[in-house]
Image: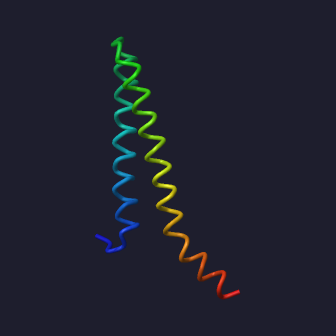
Amino acid sequence: MSSNPVLRNLRHMEKKFDGIGQEINDFNRRQAAGEMPDPEAFMDLLQKQSVTKSAMTAQFNLLQKPLKTVLNETK
């Protein structure tokens, strides 16, 4: 595993994001099968997915920042 904490965080959030996606797919399958899953649970999953995606974007930007700094300094 990488010693870079930003990459570790990105991997962790990617797993979390994928897990939430699986839960959303499960919700949709249950609904298509005629079950009546809780709509509040679906909204909660969408919110978690959105927050996780935003956090992933922020972590990715942290990873890019040193590269941008180096590129700007070499101009």
- Which quadrant of the structure image shows residue 18? top left
Colour mode? rainbow
- Which quadrant of the structure image shows residue 44? top left
Residue shown at 34%/33% (left/top)? Answer: 23
Give the x, y percent position of residue 39.
Answer: 41, 19
Q: Is residue 37 above or below residue 2?
A: above
Name the image quarter holding the N terminus. bottom left
Residue shown at 34%/28% (left/top)? Answer: 26
Q: Is residue 57 above or below residue 61?
A: above
Give the x, y percent position of residue 67.
Answer: 56, 77
Q: Residue furthest left?
A: 1
Give the x, y percent position of residue 15.
Answer: 34, 50
Give the x, y percent position of residue 62.
Answer: 50, 67
Residue shown at 36%/18% (left/top)? Answer: 38
Q: Residue furthest right?
A: 75
Side (left or right) of 64 relative to 51 = right
* Nearer to the camera, 73 or 15: 73
Residue shown at 34%/20% (left/top)? Answer: 30
Name the image quarter holding the C terminus. bottom right
